Image (tube, rainbow, N blue to C red):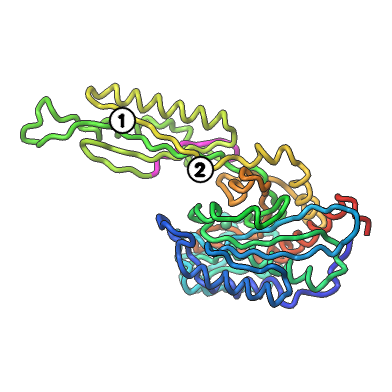
């Protein structure tokens, strides 16, 4: 193993503090990628910085995706796979990302952290017991009025610093490396515009996780259902015997959702069904329902349940009919990754070399890697050190950012060694 002799030209914390100040909030229900023009600002900045660092083939696509290559430092007969790393430039539509004012709490000495611009916003030890392991670290928070954007500018800063380290240390032995920064991850539409063939990696990692040491190779399988009850509209003055009000069937249906299968009653590996929005009208009432499970059999079970409940509710209200449309959103990447266990193992070994205890945890959500994995680019997820994503209480730390960066530097060396490179 080679350790980095030359430090990066800019530390990961300084990069992070620079990137979070750039507003890159994405927006729901927009037809184009990127959904907001502000994402171009960070994408172009990153492309310029990659050029200055000496990365090869730097380009920004028409969809605001940044691509770059770092050539192998090993030549010869050993074939070393090409490894990719991705992070997303956008931040969640849930909380404003304008005028982010990051606060560095140097040498944290324990206790709750009150955010200065809004004292009602408090990061508490009770809710974050891992703060007890962060004594002496520099904790980075917002001022309480915005999100931090650690999701995923921590991943962006870690990858940029990793590129910086590799290009300043040609003695580090690694194969070909690709990096990319994507748009519109938070609104789920960006990754469809990602050019896997042009990226040219054999496998990749998103750097978009949370707790230090964590690697994720398992996400939800996700479907969404649209349940519609059809009735008959009529003028209320002359409605007797004619009107069939679909709202009653809808209310009946929603009230029959199994209590033990909801987001508010499940955790860990349990799936859920989640009615989250709808429209009530006499002639037609519609509700949208998220179906989530780690196993395909579980999600198919949920789909059958939903269809049965919709049919039963319609049957209780003569004249009402029900229709159920189900669409797949993404699938559990584990279905593919279990065929390539070495890809997750490289990441776990890299975490250990970075001096942390590695662990895996299924994500109760999806990542860009969920779709990439099924499109032919196996892609687990690596921690960034961030916490409380999509909220004003979002925070990260110097150690989190530095360990994420170190993990990537170790990972490319482990891949080279595993391919048979003997330094
Ligand atoms: Zn993210």
State how many labels appear.
2
* Dot 1 or dot 2, earlier in sequence: 1
Measuring 53% from the left and 74% from the top, which residue is drawn there? Answer: 101
Q: Is residue 50 above or below residue 291?
A: below
- Is 271 inside the magenta-drawn segment? yes
Residue reaching furthest right? 422
Whole-percent x and y of residue 11? 71, 74
* Neighbourhood count class around disc 1 (C-alpha, 10 Å): few under 14, some 14–19, many 20 upward: some
SS for dot 2: strand
Whole-percent x and y of residue 306? 42, 29
Residue 97 appears left or right of 170: left
Measuring 68% from the left and 74% from the top, which residue is drawn there? Answer: 51
Q: Nearer the viewer, mark 1 or mark 2?
A: 2
Tell me which segment is drawn in magenta.
Answer: 268-276
Residue reaching furthest left? 237
In this orientation, does residue 110 appear?
A: no
**Quarter the N terminus occupies:** bottom right
In this orientation, does residue 147 appear?
A: yes
Ligand 1: give its quadrant: bottom right
Measuring 60% from the left and 55% from the top, which residue is drawn there? Answer: 195
Measuring 45% from the left and 61% from the top, which residue is drawn there? Answer: 35
**Quarter the C terminus occupies:** bottom right
The residue that label 1 is drawn on is 252
Which of the 4 quarters of the picture holds residue 341?
A: top right
**Residue at disc 1, CB closer than 8 Å to ligand 1:** no
Q: Is residue 244 above or below residue 111?
A: above
- Is 65 inside the magenta-drawn segment? no
* Neighbourhood count class around disc 2 (C-alpha, 10 Å): few under 14, some 14–19, many 20 upward: some
Label at residue 9: none
The residue that label 2 is drawn on is 329
SS for dot 1: helix
Q: Is residue 20 above or below residue 376?
A: below
């Amino acid at each position: 193993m080679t350790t980095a002799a030359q430090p990066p030209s800019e530390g990961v914390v300084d990069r992070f503090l620079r990137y979070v100040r750039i507003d890159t909030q994405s927006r729901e229900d927009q037809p184009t990628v990127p959904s907001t023009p502000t994402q171009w600002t960070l994408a172009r900045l990153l492309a310029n910085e990659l050029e200055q660092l000496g990365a090869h083939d730097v380009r920004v696509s028409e969809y605001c995706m940044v691509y770059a290559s770092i050539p192998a430092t090993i030549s010869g007969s050993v074939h070393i796979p090409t490894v990719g790393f991705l992070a997303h430039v956008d931040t969640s539509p849930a909380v404003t990302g304008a005028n982010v004012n990051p606060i560095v709490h140097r040498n944290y000495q324990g206790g709750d952290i009150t955010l200065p611009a809004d004292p009602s916003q408090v990061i508490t030890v009770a809710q974050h017991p891992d703060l007890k392991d962060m004594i002496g670290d520099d904790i980075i928070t917002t001022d309480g009025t915005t999100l931090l954007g650690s999701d995923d500018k921590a991943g962006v800063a870690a990858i940029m610093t990793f590129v910086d380290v590799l290009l300043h240390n040609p003695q580090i032995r690694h194969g070909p490396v690709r990096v990319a920064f994507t748009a519109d991850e938070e609104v789920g539409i960006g990754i469809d515009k990602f050019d896997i063939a042009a990226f040219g990696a054999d496998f990749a990692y998103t750097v978009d996780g949370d707790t230090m040491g964590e690697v994720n190779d398992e996400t939800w399988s996700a479907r969404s259902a649209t349940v519609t009850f059809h009735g008959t509209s009529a003028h209320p003055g002359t409605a007797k015997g004619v009107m069939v009000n679909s709202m009653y069937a809808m209310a009946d249906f929603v009230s029959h959702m199994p209590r033990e299968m909801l987001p508010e009653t499940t955790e860990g590996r349990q799936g859920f069904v989640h009615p989250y929005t709808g429209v009530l009208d006499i002639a037609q009432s519609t509700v949208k329902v998220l179906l989530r499970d780690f196993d395909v059999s579980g999600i198919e079970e949920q789909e059958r349940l939903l269809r049965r409940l919709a049919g039963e509710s319609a049957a209780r209200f003569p004249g009402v009919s029900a229709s159920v449309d189900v669409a797949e959103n993404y699938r559990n990447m584990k279905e593919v990754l279990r065929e390539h266990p070495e890809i997750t193992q490289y990441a776990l070994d890299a975490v250990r070399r970075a001096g942390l205890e590695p662990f895996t945890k299924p994500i109760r959500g999806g990542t860009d890697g969920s779709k990439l994995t099924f499109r032919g680019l196996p892609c687990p997820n690596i921690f960034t050190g961030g916490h409380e994503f999509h909220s004003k209480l979002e925070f990260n730390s110097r150690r989190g950012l530095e360990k994420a960066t170190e993990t990537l530097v170790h990972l490319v060396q482990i891949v080279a060694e595993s391919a048979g490179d003997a330094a």
